[in-house]
Structure formats: C-alpha cells, structure tokens
Image (spheres, rainbow, N blue to C red):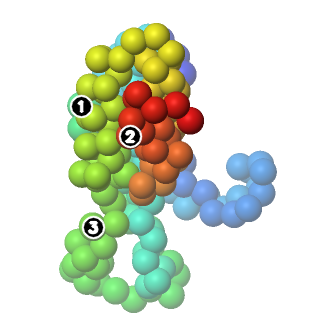
Amino acid sequence: MYTVRDNQDKVRVRVLQGESRFARNNLFLGELNIDVPKGPRGSEAVDVTYTYDINSLLEVEVKVVSTGLTQKMIIKGQDNQMTDDEIQKRMEELSYLKIQPRDLEENRLVLLRAERMYEEALGDRRKELDRYITVFEAALKKGKKRGDRGGQRGIERDPGRRG
C-alpha cells in the first residue's frame, strides 16, 4: 500500500472478512492507523502481513517501509478463550511465518548477483537482465517464497550462451 495524497501523514488499514467485491458487503473486523513521513504521493509504502492461526487468531502487522515503524493488532474469533499470555506465546511461535520472501537469504543472493551482473552487462544482455530482475522482484512482492524461477534462470544463465 502506498500513500495516495501529497503530504499524507497516516495510512489507514481496514481489516475486513468476506468474499464480496464491495468492502461495504464484508464484515468489518478492525482497523489500524499508522504514521508515515510526509512526502509526495506514492513516496511512502506500508507492508501489511496477516498471520492466521487455527485457534481463530488473526494478527495484522503494518510496517512503514522507510522507517520500520510497526503496529500490530490481534483479532480473536468469538469462540477463542485464550488468555492474553497464551495469545502472545502463540504469536511468537508463528513468527517464523512472517519472513518476507525478499528477506530470505536465497532471494537476497539472487538479487545481489543480478545487480552485479546488470552493472557489468552491456546492450541486449543488460536489457534482458533488467526484465528478469523486474519479473523476479514482482514475484517476491506477490509473496512467492522463491521468486520467479524463470526470472532466476534468466539471471543466472551464462551471458555468453544464447537461448
């Protein structure tokens, strides 16, 4: 999510449950408002991570990309009888699930290698690498744990070999 107005200083994340195309037809579960640095529209982004547990716990975490500021909210299902301490312990147990794909070591290495290769490449190979890097990064942003394998193969192929 990105800011939509110049000098916007907050981002509101509304949490809804439902399948309707229209937000008004879904069940409102809660909302988080997080401060962001003012700037031109689109210059600030927030990452939203949802962690759901079989005990009807939903943790919503909102993080401002530029500052690292984070806010969390836990929503309990009606049937959930867990204490606050039990909920906290369970969320800590699930924290390993929250690693963003772009932060996984394997993906960071692919991107570092790709950037180095891009800096050294010329002409068509440079354009080709740019396309593969863009595809790989887009897959990571969509939450694919291992990026786009075709993009990775394109990055890693021998630059002297065609096809």
Mark 2 touches mark 1? (CB < 8 Å): no
Among numbered discs 2 and 1, the one appearing first in the sequence: 1
The residue lying toward the viewer, choosing from 144 and 163, is 163
Q: Residues within 10 Å of mark 1 (few under 14, many from 20)?
A: few
Q: Do residues under tags 3 and 1 come within 8 Å of each other at their CB atoms?
A: no
70 sits to left or right of 43: left
Q: Amino acid at mark 3?
A: Tyr
At mark 2, the secondary structure is helix
**Which of marks 2 and 3 precedes in the sequence?**
3
Q: Is residue 57 above or below residue 44?
A: below
For the point 29% across and 17% down, the residue is 120
Q: Is residue 14 visible?
A: yes
- Percent across and percent down for residue 80 are 44, 85
Q: CA distance from mark 2 to mark 1?
A: 33 Å
**Alpha carbon separation for disc pair 3 and 2:** 28 Å
x, y percent for residue 90: 28, 79
Question: Which residue position is annotated with label 3?
Answer: 96
| Circle 1 SS class | loop
Q: Residue at x 35, y 21 (%)?
A: 118
Nearer to us of marks 2 and 1 is 2
Measure the C-alpha gap from mark 3 to mark 1. Answer: 22 Å
Q: Residue at x 53, y 46 (%)?
A: 150
| Mark nearer the N terminus (3 vs 1) | 1
What residue sits right under mark 1 in the picture? 67
For mark 2, what is the residue? 156
Mark 2 Cα-neighbour bin, 10 Å: few <14, some 14–19, many ≥20: some
- Amino acid residing under circle 2: Glu
Q: Is residue 89 above or below residue 73?
A: below
Three-letter amino acid code at the position of disc 1: Thr
Q: Is residue 35 above or below residue 150?
A: above
